[in-house]
């Protein structure tokens, strides 16, 4: 008897720098869930891609993504019959093709997204690339100014700091391809409420698996804390208010649509620095 290849039943699609790595850490430890050992397969974002990118260190993407369906399904060979398979790949949110491919191959899948204030997210991404020594520009505003030119020149999605924060634009693809009741969107602020316990409990309920004893404190992984810059001997980037305010202005129309799309009040995102969420 030939069995069909195993495919994920749920996807955590992003956004990057919004707690997805921490969420993955907890999901990995749930006995009814299965995630591949590969950190971020990113198959649906890069399926069929020739991977011809020319940004700094972009060539390393070849070793970090899966572009062949056979290789992708092989990641789930060890998934138990009583487990639900998942894929945590923040690259899916800004991908123009991921949502459609997911619908074609996994039409019953559930979609999870966590959204961080887009200015904070963009700067956090910039900080991480500086910390890793791959972002050549020391000033955030200079990297923002070069974003379109870099995309035109063939730099990978990682370098699109501003564009990746257009959440309504990106989420629209998922709402167009999946029933709304199979999409759950959280805010990064939700991690802070009840120290993340309520968010984790709601995710498990949404996935239809048993609750687990909530941790006393949610782990925050993959941070770019100031101490890491000192240890690496790298100058820590500073976000100037004027740069943040100009970037924030470019998101206001996206906020209008996003509020309606996800049913959340985003008024605390509309000024800089952001107000505390209610």
Image (cartoon, rainbow, N blue to C red):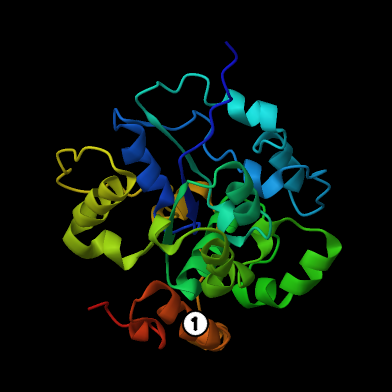
User: Is any part of residue 274 visible from this angle?
Assistant: no
**Residue that carries the numbered disc 1 in the rendered image:** 257
Percent position of residue 65, x then y:
66, 38
User: Is any part of residue 49 visible from this angle?
Assistant: yes
Which is nearer the eye, 255 or 17? Answer: 255
Element carrying mark 1 = helix
Above or below: residue 29 compared with residue 122:
above
Residue at x 61%, y 61% (from the top left corner): 94
Tell which residue pokes out farthest to the front in this image: 1
Above or below: residue 272 compared with residue 204:
below
Which is nearer the eye, 109 or 224? Answer: 109
Percent position of residue 106, x then y:
55, 43
- Tell me which corner region of the image, top left, top right, bottom left or bottom right, holds residue 182: bottom left
Tell me: 243 left or right of 63.
left
| Picture quarter with the C terminus | bottom left
Residue at x 44%, y 23% (from the top left corner): 79
Residue at x 64%, y 41% (from the top left corner): 43
Which is nearer the eye, 98 or 41? Answer: 98
Above or below: residue 124 compared with residue 213:
below
Residue at x 47%, y 82% (from the top left corner): 255
Percent position of residue 163, x then y:
63, 71
| Crowd class of label 1 (few under 14; some 14 to 19; many from 20; radius 10 Å) | some
Above or below: residue 136 compared with residue 48:
below
């Amino acid at each position: 008897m030939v069995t069909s290849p195993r495919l994920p039943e749920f996807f955590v699609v992003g956004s990057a720098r919004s707690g997805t790595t921490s969420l993955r850490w907890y999901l990995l430890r749930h006995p009814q869930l299965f995630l591949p050992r590969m950190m971020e397969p990113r198959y649906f974002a890069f399926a069929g891609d020739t991977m011809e990118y020319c940004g700094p260190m972009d060539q390393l993407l070849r070793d970090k993504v899966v572009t062949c369906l056979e290789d992708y399904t092989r990641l789930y060979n060890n998934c138990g019959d009583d487990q639900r398979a998942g894929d945590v790949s923040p690259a899916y949110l800004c991908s123009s093709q991921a949502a459609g491919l997911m619908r074609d191959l996994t039409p019953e899948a559930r979609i999870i997204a966590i959204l961080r204030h887009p200015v904070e997210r963009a700067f956090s991404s910039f900080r991480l690339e500086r910390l890793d020594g791959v972002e050549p520009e020391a000033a955030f505003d200079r990297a923002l100014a070069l974003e379109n030119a870099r995309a035109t020149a063939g730099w990978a999605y990682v370098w699109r700091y501003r564009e990746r924060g257009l959440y309504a634009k990106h989420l629209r693809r998922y709402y167009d391809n999946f029933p709304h009741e199979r999409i759950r969107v959280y805010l990064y602020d939700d991690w802070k409420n009840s120290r993340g316990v309520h968010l984790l409990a709601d995710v498990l309920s949404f996935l239809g698996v048993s609750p687990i004893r909530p941790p006393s404190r949610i782990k925050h992984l993959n941070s770019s804390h100031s101490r890491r810059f000192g240890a690496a001997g790298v100058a820590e980037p500073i976000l100037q208010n004027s740069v943040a305010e100009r970037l924030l202005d470019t998101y206001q129309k996206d906020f209008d649509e996003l509020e309606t799309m996800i049913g959340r009040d985003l008024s605390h995102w509309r000024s800089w620095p952001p107000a505390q969420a209610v």
